[in-house]
Amino acid sequence: MQKLKVYLSGEIHTDWRDQIKSGCEKQGLNVTFSSPVTDHPASDAAGDILEPESEGFWRDHKSAKVNAIRTRTLIEDCDIAVIRFGDKYKQWNAAFDAGYCAALGTPYITLHDEDIIHPLKEVDAAAHAWATTPDQVVELLQYVMG
Amino acid sequence: MQKLKVYLSGEIHTDWRDQIKSGCEKQGLNVTFSSPVTDHPASDAAGDILEPESEGFWRDHKSAKVNAIRTRTLIEDCDIAVIRFGDKYKQWNAAFDAGYCAALGTPYITLHDEDIIHPLKEVDAAAHAWATTPDQVVELLQYVMG
Amino acid sequence: MQKLKVYLSGEIHTDWRDQIKSGCEKQGLNVTFSSPVTDHPASDAAGDILEPESEGFWRDHKSAKVNAIRTRTLIEDCDIAVIRFGDKYKQWNAAFDAGYCAALGTPYITLHDEDIIHPLKEVDAAAHAWATTPDQVVELLQYVMG
Amino acid sequence: MQKLKVYLSGEIHTDWRDQIKSGCEKQGLNVTFSSPVTDHPASDAAGDILEPESEGFWRDHKSAKVNAIRTRTLIEDCDIAVIRFGDKYKQWNAAFDAGYCAALGTPYITLHDEDIIHPLKEVDAAAHAWATTPDQVVELLQYVMG
Amino acid sequence: MQKLKVYLSGEIHTDWRDQIKSGCEKQGLNVTFSSPVTDHPASDAAGDILEPESEGFWRDHKSAKVNAIRTRTLIEDCDIAVIRFGDKYKQWNAAFDAGYCAALGTPYITLHDEDIIHPLKEVDAAAHAWATTPDQVVELLQYVMG
Amino acid sequence: MQKLKVYLSGEIHTDWRDQIKSGCEKQGLNVTFSSPVTDHPASDAAGDILEPESEGFWRDHKSAKVNAIRTRTLIEDCDIAVIRFGDKYKQWNAAFDAGYCAALGTPYITLHDEDIIHPLKEVDAAAHAWATTPDQVVELLQYVMG
Amino acid sequence: MQKLKVYLSGEIHTDWRDQIKSGCEKQGLNVTFSSPVTDHPASDAAGDILEPESEGFWRDHKSAKVNAIRTRTLIEDCDIAVIRFGDKYKQWNAAFDAGYCAALGTPYITLHDEDIIHPLKEVDAAAHAWATTPDQVVELLQYVMG
Amino acid sequence: MQKLKVYLSGEIHTDWRDQIKSGCEKQGLNVTFSSPVTDHPASDAAGDILEPESEGFWRDHKSAKVNAIRTRTLIEDCDIAVIRFGDKYKQWNAAFDAGYCAALGTPYITLHDEDIIHPLKEVDAAAHAWATTPDQVVELLQYVMG
């Protein structure tokens, strides 16, 4: 496999994306990574430049739809997604992305600890692999690219 | 609109499904409802009749894949989904279903309280409506069916 | 052709829908008709039962998304659409429905007067027929159903 | 996001396309823009080289179908559309393009003044963002591309 | 197989459709047949009720688009098509229908004499069977329905 | 789940289909079953009524294409497939059907003994469940239908 | 429009392909052309390297299926097709390609003389333009590419 | 045809892939080849880096799902597949790939000896060509690329 487009969805408060990127680089893999906007305040404010000025639900709504322009385009374009669930927050957007990939038939790898296996069972059931560390994801990508 | 097939996804620990069903019945709406298996222990044990006997991840995996036969078939067949987020548990399966509907282009209504607007913003952004009570869902269906 | 599902899109201020329906009934055609909600104030208020209470853009937005649950479902289900452009208002929703049908490959018939041929040329170019009276639409449906 | 293909649909009598293009250029964004033929008389005459010679409806029809070769190909190929409604003309082709994008699942941004919010509510309901100035569109694209 | 929807495309100057229908009836097969309008003058005049009045190319164009409302709907709805090529006329519409079925993945059976095997080789290559008599088609349908 | 269409693919030399059917009947499940033609000599001779008379490869080819009219139609129409691998013959058609279902996104259950787990690992990886007895399949269907 | 992939289908006994290619080259258009194999005897013999050795129907069948590998791949990949009908032969393959394009939603231009307007009316009805000379096709492509 | 992406599926114990690759190289064909991982022990161990540690069914399951990330991506991306059946093993994965290609509409060539024509008849029926030697495949590709 000459190259691979990988979308990195989910948790934005740890450096798992960097670990996967640098791991793939060390192995010389020809992978193009993409992600949602991972700057939390910027992401929440994505719609603020647009009218009508809003608070609460509509501010979130405007921002989420702007962010979806990016995420939807990148998910539809990727070959594989890696979807990370951390130990904080609701992370419903990550599960949403998993469902989106499943419906498109795009393979995805979940990345999460053992203690959330049970609540993630539907998400894992549609996944092609479950990894617990960024290193395992790198190994998987290396194997898959042959 | 002569009839409507509505899939009721998400929380299984309160009686919101019954409220919507009886509300629609009172209004005489021609709606067919479907749901995942809502008996929690039965759902967790869905794969237990199958080999190989398993514990932990694989038991969940087997059960979740069996349940997916039902949920995938019903989601692909429905006209609209109602996706309920309660105040307990991770409920990643509900967000997964929302993403699945979004990718299929199937309209869905979210049903949740105001205090989880922010973590649900991506799920609500792709929804056609956000309701806070089962009665509102009934009113919506009544309006939509004309 | 044993039966036909026809969606009637567009103008809501004249009785063209009734003329087509009664014309088809007179001919004994087995046609099921569907429409958007044609009660203008009700349609504008479709989202008012839902939170957050809104004015202006967001009120329109909430209502339009609720209405889209109905219209999207009916358009995706119909065999043919008839799309009517009258002599008042912007009627961008009618042109939107035409574009939606075109992308789905659903055949549609436009119904409009001669004086708006030029601004409707893109909409007519993707149509299967242009009619100027409800009677012509009835004749077309009668012919098409054989 | 490394690059983006953006289709600029709608109004052809003001310089909004140039403003967006030069704004993106200033920001160094890697965006490829495409448009319908924006020379009005040329667009109306697109079919004149073909037989049979025609006037009125058929001249419009021939030209609109030739133009659709271009617009359909570009819309199906783009990542995002920006759809501009000005204060003149019927602009049904712009609303048609919006409906086409909606059915394909291609995200689009509308660009229009506040005074036409109400008649555009169905078009805006399916949009990912509503902007009122070309500068806002540039800001959106810059944000979306990260 | 409990029932089958069969579209009968092509030649309209011999009674092959009746032979297949009565043959299936004799065998008690639960088949629903559909066809284009087979009354040649009516088919050529299908667009005559519509403006603008036309001759030559545009008359044919208008009529062919009206007929396509019927044929496209029936082809997209059928389970199998039978496509008949006789010994007269160009019959490009029959070959067009074959290509349309092939792209949809709808199986079709060709029905033609041995002397046109060579010019029909591309059409036969995408067919699931080639029959030379209506009786063979009946036998095929009987076998296929089990 | 009110009813289910189940396609029974694979082995034709044991009575597993009858066991599943009678098991579901005992449980009062509203399931419609369909199958390929399971009469082996009839299936091999499916193309014999058609010209040109053939032996060897082309006889098989003609027959297989006729059988595919049936199997393709039924697979595309079913909600779930059960795919049985016995202990004899190559059974490549069963694996072919599994791949076909996987590409369509149609869930399938495999039914086979433990000693062929390894060669069937790719087929099982895309399945929603692996059963070893017809009774387990009945239990699965009963659970899935709720 | 920066570049265009154009498939040239149909008649192989005149030099219309060369005229279009050289015309586009003169205009400096960035068009990539593709075609079926236009060497008639080679095309008829495409399957001769494969077993089983065949005559008549099966030789045609084998060759047509080999040719379809090429034509199907190129048609699915092109942006536009030009489909040429000459004054000789049945040319059912050209009409088949037109139907295939229509079902895919790929725009096509027909190229034929006035005397076959009537038998080509279904093919022309689904076309985006009808040209009578290769020069007109070049002009169309030049216009479409802007 | 300027270039072609060919997926080589099936048997991994003989050098047929190398023969096709070197044959195409000799002919100067611009073909990009891809394959599953053909190192048998590595393929069986693909999931071993992931938790939970497993034996038997689940080890195969984990590995097969990891391998499917690669194979599914490559099959969905290829223009043509060549599917090889040797004289050993069950090779159900090869037949699975054939079914997957058939459902996607991706043309494939089978490569196998004469003695397994009969059990492969369903797989061959959906193929575009049957070859018995790698040299024939090279000849086919050379012809197809013109």
Image: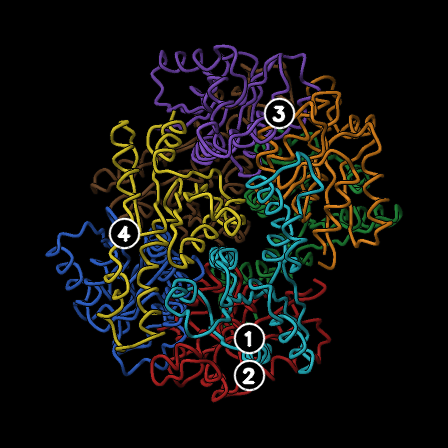
Chain colours: A blue, B red, C green, D brown, E orange, F cyan, G purple, H yellow
Q: Quick one: quadrant of the C terminus of chain F?
A: bottom right
Residue located beneath label 4 in the image:
A5
Residue located beneath label 1 in the image:
B8
Q: Chain of mark 3?
A: G
Q: Chain of mark 1?
A: B
Alpha carbons under labels 2 and 1: distance apart: 9 Å
Residue located beneath label 2 in the image:
B16
* Element class at badge 1: strand
Q: Chain of mark 4?
A: A
Q: Are marks 1 and 3 on the same chain?
A: no
Question: What residue is drawn where x is 76% and y is 54%?
Answer: C32
Q: Are marks 2 and 1 on the same chain?
A: yes
Label 1 CA crowd tier, 10 Å (few <14, some 14–19, many 20+): many
Question: What residue is drawn where x is 40% and y is 23%?
Answer: G33
Which amino acid does the dot numbered 2 rest on? Answer: Trp
Which amino acid does the dot numbered 1 rest on? Answer: Leu
x and y percentages locating residue G76 in the rendered image: 46, 36
Alpha carbons under labels 1 and 3: distance apart: 51 Å
Q: Are marks 4 and 2 on the same chain?
A: no
Q: Quick one: quadrant of the N terminus of chain F?
A: bottom right
x and y percentages locating residue D2 in the rendered image: 24, 46
* Element class at badge 4: strand
